[in-house]
Amino acid sequence: MKANGEAIFGTRSAGIYPYELDYAEFTCRDHRLFIHVFAPVAHIDLYKCANHVKRVYLLETGEEIEFVTTKSCEKDSVTIILPPEHLRDRAYYCLGLELEERDPVYESFEE
């Protein structure tokens, strides 16, 4: 709780993410999206998340995490988060995404 309190206390629902991630859940607060990672992952792909991400960091240490924002072959927004080697085999940690927008922005499946 001490390491990840920022992502728990005073947060709200991050809305309905259009894809099911069986390894993570989201919370948010103004200009922050938090990804609670429950299983080891080599990378996190946030499809249809149209936010302008300013930075990604590990909550417990503040360590900067590498990420790329791009478009998929279907022209959908995607943010790819690349946890460092020491996190790839680990579960139960939280990443913070600093956003330009106040709330998470998910693109519609409609054209």
Image (cartoon, rainbow, N blue to C red):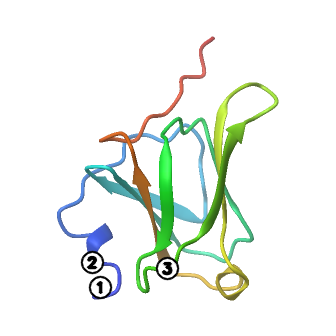
Whole-angstrom CA distance, mark 1 to mark 3, is 11 Å
Q: Mark 1 or mark 3, which has the lower sequence index?
A: 1
Where is residue 89 drawn, in percent x and y? Answer: 71, 85
Residue shown at 38%/43% (left/top)?
100
Q: Secondary structure at mark 1?
A: loop
Instruction: Point out the residue furthest to the left here.
Output: 10
Q: Secondary structure at mark 2?
A: helix
Q: Give residue 43's quadrant in the image.
A: bottom right
Where is residue 91 drawn, in percent x and y? Answer: 58, 82
Q: Is residue 9 above or below residue 30?
A: below
Residue shown at 70%/71% (left/top)?
41
Whole-angstrom CA distance, mark 2 to mark 3, is 11 Å
Instruction: Tell me the amino acid under the disc marked 1.
Output: Met
Residue shown at 40%/41% (left/top)?
104
Disc 2 crowd, CA 10 A, few/some/many (<14, 14-19, 20+):
few
Whether residue 8 sits left or right of residue 68 in the image: it is left
Query: Do the CB atoms of the residues marked 1 and 2 lie less than 8 Å apart?
Result: yes
Q: Which residue is mark 1?
A: 1
Q: Which residue is mark 3?
A: 93
Disc 1 crowd, CA 10 A, few/some/many (<14, 14-19, 20+):
few
Whole-angstrom CA distance, mark 1 to mark 2, is 5 Å
Q: Which residue is mark 2?
A: 5
Instruction: Tell me the amino acid under the disc marked 2.
Output: Gly
